[in-house]
Image: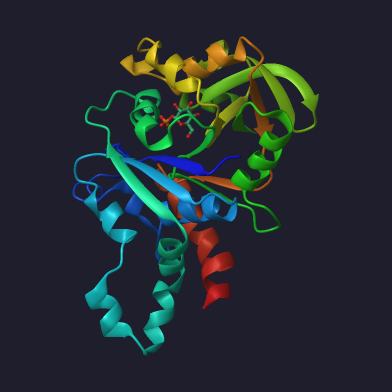
Amino acid sequence: MIRKCLFPAAGYGTRFLPATKAMPKEMLPIVNKPLIEYAVEEARDAGLRHMALVTGRGKRALEDHFDISYELEHQIRGTEKEKFLAGTRELIDTCTFSYTRQVEMKGLGHAILSGQPLIGDEPFAVVLADDLCLNLEGDGVLTQMIQLYKKYRCSIVAIQEVPRDQTHKYGVIAGEQMADDLYRVSHMVEKPSPQDAPSNLAIIGRYILTPDIFDLIADTQPGKGGEIQITDALMKQAQNGGVLAYKFKGLRFDCGDAEGYLQASNFCYENVYLNGR
Ligand code: G1P
């Protein structure tokens, strides 16, 4: 079964400069909680207990966040502020966190390959924390995907329909429709222009990957933008019928850009934060 979740978190976050100059973009708060914590919660809610973070230079705050802060906790013990750390503390107590560094920024495929020593030879999930996914009506996106994995035992990417003029921001798939919300992928392209896009079904930052992906990534040449793309490695799995694309239930906010970030903040303030206080 799937036990581990990989969080590629080495990127510079240039779209959020200057905020991300000295702070990891994954620590940007949506209201009062950093993006990485929403991501780890989604994985924990899906039953995963091993959190594997691929970090880079300047990302120490991520490790400190998922560690006990004795002074702070001592300071607020017994006060009404204690409850604000309860959620984070529960993650620390119920999950293990391991870290490795991606020493060169050579793309998402390369970041995932850098995580191989933390994952080993087992299927695993990948969550890109700047894609914030919420499903207030039911199961989180990763939970939905793991249920599918139990049935099909192959790699799965989460997809959503995007306007045609947005395909250049995503990996885009084409495939045979197996159900309303499920496709068997026959083709995938990284960030195609609208005229080259095989559909408007865009991959978002949730993946279930079988471990043969590591050898496939190692064999993948730099693609779009000169980077080693997970989309290109997955295309090789897809050629053997080994990749499904799942139209998830729920909302997704692209927190890598200012507009999505603000939408996520407003949504969480009204629907999550105010309810939890
Ligand atoms: C990455 C992937 C892309 C995917 C996207 C989802 O791109 O390369 O295929 O659609 O994440 O957020 P990035 O946004 O890191 O450029």
Residue for point 70% across, 20% down: 184
* Nearer to the camera, 206 or 262: 206
Q: Residue furthest bottom?
A: 78
Name the spot of residue 186 as percent of width and height, x first.
65, 13
Q: Is residue 13 something that shows in the picture?
A: no
Instruction: State which quadrant residue 173 falls in.
Output: top right
Dividing the image into four equal quarters, which quarter contains ligand 1? top left
Q: Work out whether 233 lies above or below 135.
A: above
Residue 172: % across, % down? 56, 21
The correct choice, above or below, for 11 with respect to 107 in the image is below
The x and y percentages for residue 81 are 38, 83
- Residue 252 lies in quadrant: top right
Residue 153 to residue 257: above or below: above
Answer with left or right where residue 161 lies relative to residue 234. right
Residue 61 in which image quadrant: bottom left
Name the residue at the front extreme: 121
